Image: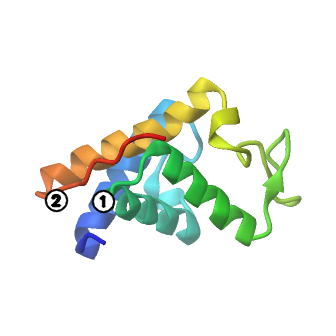
Amino acid sequence: MVQLSESCALSCAQVVFKAYAVYTASVPSSWELLHDAERSGCVAMVKRVADGDTARDLHAGWSDEMRKAGWVYGRMYEVDGKKHPLLRPYADLAHHEQMQYKVIQQVARTMLEAYGVRVPRRRAR
């Protein structure tokens, strides 16, 4: 596991989130408006990229965390019902949904490398 300073991980996560928000046109589009759990999730993804996770790995890890928190697949996103349309296998995601994870992975990798972190390369499965 790559050792990252918290300030490096946080800085990278903020840039990753901004790129993700622009790509998906998601709301909120500001880091400051995210809940603590959402910010922590962004930082965790950066740390996973630092360890060499692929877009597929990032989706699998996110899915596992969501399921542990009681979320299930649903055609529509429902906070109260804890349903999310992306809680399905990576291979079943539409191309633009898979690209969300590739954006996260590539922006995180670029930011980490800018901070001097050597990110291992894994082959996509």
Closer to the chain start, of discs 1 and 2, is 1
Q: Picture coordinates of residue 112 (x, y %)?
A: 22, 54
Q: Report the residue at 85% width, 46% height from top.
A: 74
Q: Which residue is mark 2?
A: 117
Kind of residue indicated by mark 1: Ala
Nearest to the observer: residue 38 or residue 48: 48
Q: Secondary structure at mark 1?
A: helix
Q: Report the residue at 38% width, 45% height from top.
A: 105
Reply above or below: 119 against 105.
below
Q: Report the residue at 14% width, 57% height from top.
A: 115
Q: Which residue is mark 1?
A: 50
What residue occupies the far top of the structure in this picture?
95
Q: Picture coordinates of residue 68 (x, y %)?
A: 72, 71
Q: CB atoms at circles 1 and 2 under 8 Å apart?
A: yes
Nearest to the observer: residue 6 or residue 73: 73
User: Which quarter shows the N terminus?
Assistant: bottom left
Left-right relation of 34 to 81:
left
Instruction: Tell me the distance, in whole angstroms, between the alpha carbons under discs 1 and 2.
Output: 8 Å
Q: Picture coordinates of residue 97 (x, y %)?
A: 60, 33
What residue occupies the far left of the structure in this picture?
116
What residue occupies the far right of the structure in this picture?
81
